[in-house]
Image (cartoon, rainbow, N blue to C red):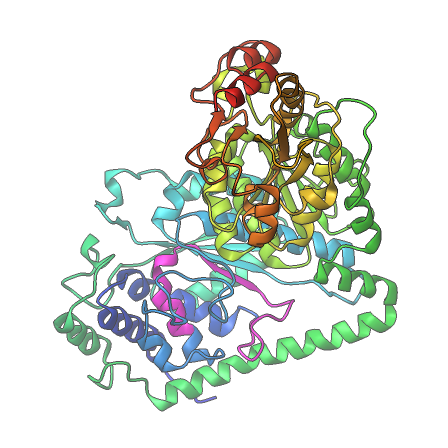
Amino acid sequence: MEKIDNNLAVNAIRVLAADAVQQAKSGHPGFPLGAAPIVYELFANHLRHDPADPEWFDRDRFVLSAGHGSAMLYAVLHLFGYPKMGLDEVKRFRQADSLTPGHPEHGHTPGVDATTGPLGAGLGMAVGMAMAEAHLAKVFGRPGLPLVNHYTYALCGDGCMMEGISSEVFSLAGTLGLSKLIVLYDSNNITIEGSTELAFTEDVAARMRAFGFQTLEVEDGTDTDAIGEAIRLAKADTARPSFITVRTQIGYGVPAKQGTASAHGEPLGEDNIKVLRENLGWPSDEAFFVPAEVYSHYCGKAERGATARAEWKAIEASYAGAEAEAYALFGKYMGRGLPASALAYLGEDVVAEKAEATRNISGNILNALKDDVPFLIGGSADLAPSNKTEMKGAGSFFADSPEGRNIHFGVRELGMGAIALGLSLHGGLMPYVATFMVFADYIKPMIRLAALMELPVLYVLTHDSIGVGEDGPTHEPVEQLAMLRSTPGVYLFRPADETETRAAYHFALTGGRPTALALSRQNLAPIPSSNAGARRGGYVLAREDGGVADVVLVASGSEVALALEARGLLAKKGVDARVVSMPSLDVFFEQDKEYRDEVLPPTVTRRVAVEAGSRYSWGEVVGPFGAYVTMDGFGASAPAGVLFERFGFTAEKVAEAALGL
C-alpha cells in the first residue's frame, strides 16, 4: 500500500463524484463533497468489507440512507476495486443499464447492501440488519467461535432525520439496545428549500439520547482522525446503539456553492469544478483523473477486508467441525428453504368442519410452521392478539433475549415495514409483519421497496373488509386491495378458507417475492376449495351444469361463499353459472393463456366480480360486458352482517347483478 496524504484519498472521492454528476448533467454533488471524509474513514479503516467478495456473510453492513449521495458511494466502490465497478461505470452515472443508477440499488450494483432513496427508509433497514445480526449471533454463538459478529453502519443526512420513520425505528433500536448499530449523521444544515432553520430546529442529539443512543459529535467534518476516534468510541459501547453527528459543509471546496441549497441537487458546472480542483490541490484538470498512487493506496486498504474475510472463513471451518449440528442448522437459515414437511402441510386440501376467520387460520398456520421453519421471525404493530401473529413458545426479541422470534414493533407500521426489509436483506431470516389491512397505507412505501428489491417479506393484513363492522369507515379497507395489486412485483392473496390460506402461505414462503395476505376478521363458511388451484391464483370452484356457462361469478375471500349461494339462486331461474375463486389476481395473470382461458372462457362475456372492496383491478376479469358487486364508498359503523346487506353483499344481490346481464 502506497502511503499518501489522507486528503488526496478523500479528494479522489470528491472529484470523481463531481465529475460523474457533471457528465450526467444530473445528480447531487453537494452531499458527496461534504461527506467524503466520513465514507473514506469508514471504508478505509473500520468497515469490514472485501471487494473480492462483496456478499461474504459476516461482513459489516453499510446503508447509505441519504441515497441521493450515490455518486459518492460509486466513487468509493470504484476506488476499492469492487467487481465490474471500473471507471467507465462511474462515467455512466445515471445512464441506461449502468451499474451506477441515480440512487443505490441492491442486487444491481456490487457492494450496495440496500436500495435507498426515500429519505429515512435506509435507517429502518439498518435497524433491521442490526436486529438480524443480534438474533443470529445469539442463536449460533458458541464460546470462542463468533460465527456471526459484525456491525451495521448507516449514513444519513438532515432529511433522513426529519422523516418520521427515523423516530419510529430509532426508538425501537434504543429499546432493544442494538449496540452494533452505528449511525453517522452528516449534519450540514441544508435542505432543498434552504437552511434547516426553516423547519428543523430541534436538538437531534438530545432526541437520540432520549431514544437510548450513545451520542458523539465531530465538529470538523474534514478531520478523518476525529471521525475515526468517534467510530472507535461507538464500538466500545456494548450496551447502546451509537449516533455520531459529523458537522460538514455541503458543496465543500466550491465557494459559490458551499453551504448553500443550490449545491444539493444540480451539477456544479464546469467553471465550479475547475475551482474545486484548484481548491483541493488536485493534480489534473482532466475529468475522472485519479493518480496511480491513489489507486495503490485504496488497494492496500482493501487488504484489511481480505484478511478479515480469511479469518472468518477459518472460524467457519472450525465451527463446522466443532459444532456440526449447529452449522448444519446455520446452512438451513442461509438457504431459507422450506423442508418437505412444511411444503406438504402447506400443500394440503383441508376439509373444514366449521366456519372460521382466515386471520385465525393464519395464526394456526404460523404456529404449525414455527418449528419446521426456525428462521421465520416477525411480529405485529402492537396488534398480535388481533392479527393472530404470535408464535407461541418462540420467545420475544428483547434487549436481553435477542434470540426471541416474536418482535414487538409497537405502534410503528412504517418503521416496521422498513425493519422487515433489513431483516430480509441481512440474510438468514424470513420476516413477516402484520397490522390491520386498512393500515397498509402506512406500510406502502416499504412494500414498494420490497418489490423493487424482490425481497420475500410476508405481510399479514387482517380485518380485510367492511366485515370489520362496528369500527367503522376509518378501519374498513376498500381501496387497499387495489392499491396493493397495482404495485408491480407484489403478490396479494385474499383466501376464502383454510385450504386457500395454506396455499397463500406456500406461495409466500417459496415464491421469493413480497406477498400480502388479506385476511378476514369474521368467520367464513367452508367451501370445496383447491390448494393447487389457489396456488395458480384462480380456479373453477363450481362448474356449470351444461356445456357452456351463461355467466361466470368471480369472487375472492369472504365473498366466494356468496357467489356459490348465488349460483344456486340462479339455477332456480334457469341460469347456468360457473363460480371462480380468485384468491390472487396477480398470480392468476402470470399463468399461461391456455389456463386463463380455461378458467375464464373468452366466449362467456357475462361475468360478475364480487369483492367487498373497490372495483378497480377487476376490469380485465370482468370485461366490457360484465358487472360488479363491489364497494364504491367508505363503509359505515354497524355490525358486519348489517353492512354486508346494506352494501349489497348478499347472494340475492349477486344473482340480481347476473340476471341484469
Which of the 4 image quadrants contains residue 469?
top right
Q: Nearer the viewer, residue 555 or 118?
A: 555
Query: Please, is residue 273 above or below residue 184 in the view?
Result: below
> Residue 300 colored magenta?
no
Query: Please, is residue 348 above or below residue 152 in the view?
Result: above
In this rendering, does residue 179 appear at all? Answer: no
Q: Nearer the viewer, residue 626 or 547?
A: 547
Which of the 4 image quadrants contains residue 308?
bottom right
In the rendered structure, the answer to whether residue 84 lies left or right of residue 419 reads left
Q: Nearer the viewer, residue 235 or 197?
A: 197
In this rendering, does residue 443 appear at all? Answer: yes
In the rendered structure, the answer to whether residue 122 lies left or right of residue 307 reads left
Q: Which residues are magenta?
A: 49-76
Coordinates of residue 32 in the picture (x, y in percent): 32, 65
Q: Nearer the viewer, residue 550 or 488?
A: 550
Coordinates of residue 544 in the picture (x, y in percent): 66, 32
> Residue 70 colored magenta?
yes
In the rendered structure, the answer to whether residue 661 lies left or right of residue 11 reads right
Residue at (58% x, 9% y) in the render: 642
Residue at (81% x, 29% y) in the render: 352
Coordinates of residue 211 in the picture (x, y in percent): 52, 39
Query: Please, is residue 311 above or below residue 248 in the view?
Result: below
In the rendered structure, the answer to whether residue 196 lies left or right of residue 3 reads left
Coordinates of residue 643 in the picture (x, y in percent): 55, 12
Number of marks in picture = 0
Residue at (32% x, 67% y) in the render: 94
